[in-house]
Image (cartoon, rainbow, N blue to C red):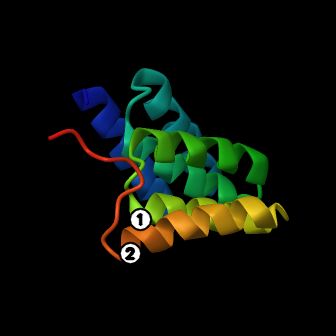
Amino acid sequence: MSDEVQDIFDDANGDLAIGDLESAVVKYRRCVELDADFFDGWHALAMALMKTGKIKEAIGAGLQATTLKPNDLLAWTALSQMYVQDGQIGEAEDAKANARILSLGGKIVKEAE
C-alpha cells in the first residue's frame, strides 16, 4: 500500500472516530479506488456504508473484502449483518456459516503452502 493510501485511510478512520461517517465513506472509497486490493479499505468502507444505511453498497464492499481475504472471520460476520439488514436471510445464514467455520479454526479457502 502506498503512503498516500495509508494517509487517506488514517484520515478516514479519524472521521469515523468523530462520527463524520459521510466523510469517512468518501475517503474509504478513495482508498479502494487507488488500491483495489486493499482489504482494510474495503472492509472499513463496507462498515461505514452499513452505518449510513447504504446497505446494498455495503454488501458489495463486504463481498469484495471477503473475496480478498476469504478466511477473515470479521469480514464474514460483518457481511452476515449486512445481509440481515437487507432482509436477505439465506445469504446472511451462509455468511454466518462461513464465520462459524473460521471461528472453529477451519478455512473457507485453503491457503497456499
Q: Compared with residue 30, is residue 84 higher up or lower down, i.e. above or below? A: below
For residue 101, say whether it is visible: yes
Identified at 79% across, 67% down, the residue is 89
Instruction: Bin the neighbour count of mark 1 within 10 Å (Cα to Cα): few under 14, some 14-19, many 20 and up.
Output: many
Q: Nearer the viewer, residue 18 or 108?
A: 108
Q: Where residue 62 appears, x then y in whole percent?
A: 57, 49
Q: Which three-letter amino acid code belongs to the residue tagged 2?
A: Ser
Q: Secondary structure at mark 1?
A: helix
Q: Which residue is mark 2?
A: 103
Do residues under tags 1 and 2 come within 8 Å of each other at their CB atoms? yes
**In the picture, residue 34 is in which quadrant?**
top left
Q: Where residue 109 appears, x then y in whole percent?
A: 38, 47
**Left or right: 88 with respect to 5?**
right
Q: Where residue 5 appears, x then y in whole percent?
A: 33, 32
Q: Which three-letter amino acid code belongs to the residue tagged 1?
A: Leu
For residue 51, say whether it is visible: no
Q: Which residue is mark 1?
A: 73
Q: Earlier in the sequence, mark 1 or mark 2?
A: 1
Q: Nearer the viewer, residue 37 or 15?
A: 37
Q: Secondary structure at mark 2?
A: helix
Q: Compared with residue 55, is residue 5 higher up or lower down, i.e. above or below? A: above
Q: Where residue 88 appears, x then y in whole percent?
A: 81, 61
Q: Quadrant of the C terminus?
A: top left
